[in-house]
Image: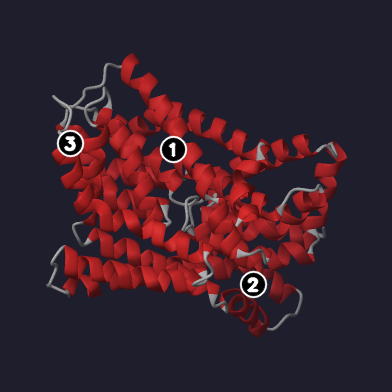
Amino acid sequence: MGALGLIVIAMFVVLALLRVPVWIALLAPALLYSFAEGQPVIFSATNMMRELDSFTFLAIPLFIYVGSLMNHGDITENIFNFADSLVGHYQGGLAQVNIVTSLIFAGISGSALADIGGVGRVLIKSMVDADYDADFSAALTSASATVGPIFPPSIPLIIFGIIAEVSVLSLLLAGALPALLTVAALMVGTVYIAKARDLPSNDKRASLGNVARTFVYALPALLTPVVLVAGMLAGVFSPTEAAGVTVAYILLVNTLVYRIVDFRYVWDAAVETAKTSGSIVIIVAAASVFSFVLSVEGVDTMFADAMFSISSNKIVLLLLVNAVLLFIGLFLDPIAALVMMTPIVEPTLAQAGVDPIHIGVIMVFNLMLGLLTPPLGLSVYLSAEISGVPVADVFSRTKLYYVILIVALLIITYVPQITLFIPRTF
């Protein structure tokens, strides 16, 4: 790597530490490099447009729109009521409801922050009303939302597939079992926490009739991920077409089932989607230019050489890559980190014999854990804002769940069959 490449990376690190908007921290050093190398501005603009010029990329704003539409209807509350009727009577039952509800919502939104912004508000308020500590409620909501970017549909997995030129359909299907494993780990951990801290429970078990009634109301939402995954497995539609079908499905459910006739929410959801999608698009575009600079400077080759100089053993390499990604996730937005690191990490692990689909799930899980750790910790900041408690308190209560998620990450890393079973079978 030349001196100019080092300056570009150092400039990015400084801007990131100063909390400059991430797209500026990525784009400014990349443009400086282009000017210094005598490249016309149009060259960088072309790189940015090439990264975004993808039919599959259209699935991202569509899935974000689905989550926004749900937040304006009764679907969120119905999901919560059904989960509460199932497990709310156990000690720490509402904590388990939180996890189950996040899983169901994950099958629709595909985003951790959308999960927290949607069902998170209902979950935290309900837990606090039931005498759970607000900081614990916020911490659990942040942790359970990490399932969103793994369970299909997953916005980060779509981005990884586009960049690494890996089947997006296979990636989306690959995330299902790791997400279920993560949910199981969180629920087992919550059983221990419930006993250790004497968490409350509902006064009595819900009647069979109440369970059936809440199930009927929640069924349209429960069917959303089923329809989506089944349609993709059957080859009926691509991930992008699945996103469009899901939008139409949610609109029909809100209108015909939940009788929402005030359609102003459709516009409000569209505005929210435009804001969220815009931030993702500009980060992806800026990161693509920065990633190109790293490629020109041979950072991908240097990274591979550095990893293989330590060990050529696949087990050791996976551990090293996990450590690197977890460290990067502390400081960098997950989407930006994914765009920047995929061209560096994916070829290295692929050279070691790791399946690219497995690599995608590992990378996304790693980087999403950065949403729970300072100084970035976007999930924790959002949950703290909703709950009205200090961010430091939420970070403190998140530590045990972070350990649980690390254990889940290691299992997913070293048991690739969990990730690859569905894509290879279907």
Callout 3: few (<14), some (14-19), or many (20+) C-alpha neighbours within 10 Å? few
- Residue at 53% x, 44% y: name it: 177
What is the distance, in whole Å, between disc 2 and disc 3 at their CAs? 63 Å
Residue 35 vs residue 169, the one in the foreground: 169
* Towards the viewer: 305 or 216: 216
Label 3–label 1 contact, CB within 8 A: no
Query: Gap between marks 2 and 1, in whole Å?
Result: 42 Å
Q: If you read the primary sequence from the N terminus, does the residue marked by circle 2 or circle 1 appear first?
A: 2
Residue 119: image location, x then y, percent: 28, 49
- Numbered tag placed on residue 9 in the rendering: none
Provide the residue designation for mark 1: 183
340 displayed left or right of 232: right
**Helix, strand or loop at mark 1:** helix
Secondary structure of residue under mark 3: helix
Question: Mark 2 — residue?
Answer: 31
10 Å crowding of disc 2: few (<14), some (14-19), many (20+): many
Q: Is residue 374 visible?
A: no
Residue plotted at (51% across, 42% down)? 369
User: Residue 302 location in percent, x, y?
Assistant: 82, 52
* Tag 2 secondary structure: helix
Q: Position of residue 267 (x, y in %)?
A: 24, 75
Q: Which residue is mark 3?
A: 208
| Rendered residue at 24%/27% (across/down) | 133
Residue mark closest to the camera, 2 vs 3: 3
* Three-letter code, disc 1: Val
Q: Residue type at mark 2?
A: Leu
Of residues 118 and 417, the one drawn nearer to the viewer in this rendering = 417
* Residue 299, x across and y down, in percent: 77, 57
Label 1: few (<14), some (14–19) or many (≥20) C-alpha neighbours in 10 Å: many
Q: How many marks?
A: 3
Quadrant location, the C terminus: bottom right
Assign the N terminus to one quadrant of the image: bottom right
